[in-house]
Image: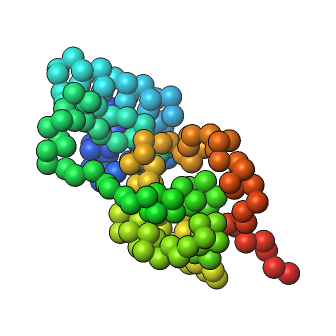
């Protein structure tokens, strides 16, 4: 077996983005540079043979994606995630200020966020960290849907600074 094909099989078998650390763990003796080289080689091969897909780095990992020119055909079969404006507001609060408690989200927005939180949980864009209080955070799926490697890749928040400057932070201060 060849390392390149093992990496290809690992990424192919993943249901989403496969973290690079998991690939490196499964293929001992492979470095990050080796992994990147193998992925580049696979993508070159896919391009030369006219494949409709390629491997991209997403959410600190790798996943198969369809090349852009095939998007119109895929849209006929796969509906994109559609979110209401309130859900997008909640998602922005969690992405930029999270992890956040529901109380903090409601305080920032000035309205109850229960329905939006349920919708975002259903779409697997956020998840809950158990504890007191429950804290909402973005998921790997959020990064995949928005094409980000990490939350640090989010657009600059400077235009919103005045709105958030006086708002409470979502991470509660430690007691004691």
Looking at the image, which is closer to me, 176 or 73? Answer: 73
The location of residue 136, given as percent across then percent down, is 55, 69
The location of residue 174, given as percent across then percent down, is 79, 74
Give the residue at the far top of this rendering: 48
Q: Is residue 168 left or right of residue 37?
A: right
Vertical placement of residue 30 versus 96, above or below: above
Q: Quadrant of the C terminus?
A: bottom right
Looking at the image, which is closer to me, 157 or 46? Answer: 157
Q: Is residue 49 left or right of residue 87?
A: left
Query: How many labels, in total?
Result: 0
Q: Quadrant of the N terminus?
A: top left
Vertical placement of residue 116 versus 25, above or below: below
Q: Residue at x 73, y 66 (%)?
A: 168
Q: Residue at x 30, y 27 (%)?
A: 42
Q: Quadrant of residue 23?
A: top left
Q: Residue at x 53, y 76 (%)?
A: 112
Q: Residue at x 32, y 56 (%)?
A: 82
Looking at the image, which is closer to me, 116 or 6? Answer: 116
- Whether residue 38 is visible here, answered yes or no, is yes
- Whether residue 2 is visible here, answered yes or no, is no
Vertical placement of residue 45 versus 102, above or below: above
Q: Quadrant of residue 97?
A: bottom right
Vertical placement of residue 32 versus 9, above or below: above
Q: Is residue 39 left or right of residue 150?
A: left
The location of residue 113, given as percent across then percent down, is 50, 73
The location of residue 140, given as percent across then percent down, is 45, 54
Task: Indicate how the structure is coloured in the image.
Answer: rainbow
């Amino acid at each position: 077996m060849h390392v390149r094909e093992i990496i290809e099989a690992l990424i192919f078998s993943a249901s989403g983005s496969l973290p690079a650390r998991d690939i490196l763990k499964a293929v001992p003796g492979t470095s990050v540079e080796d992994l990147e080289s193998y992925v580049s080689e696979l993508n070159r091969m896919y391009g030369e043979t006219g494949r409709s897909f390629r491997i991209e780095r997403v959410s600190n990992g790798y996943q198969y994606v369809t090349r852009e020119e095939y998007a119109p055909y895929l849209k006929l079969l796969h509906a994109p995630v559609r979110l209401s404006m309130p859900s997008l507001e909640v998602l922005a609060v969690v992405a930029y200020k999270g992890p956040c408690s529901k109380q903090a989200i409601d305080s920032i927005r000035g309205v109850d966020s229960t329905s939006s939180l349920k919708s975002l949980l259903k779409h697997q864009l956020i998840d809950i960290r158990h504890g007191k209080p429950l804290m909402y955070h973005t998921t790997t799926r959020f990064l995949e849907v928005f094409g980000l490697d990490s939350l640090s890749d989010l657009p600059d928040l400077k235009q919103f600074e005045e709105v958030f400057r006086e708002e409470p932070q979502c991470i509660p201060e430690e007691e004691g």
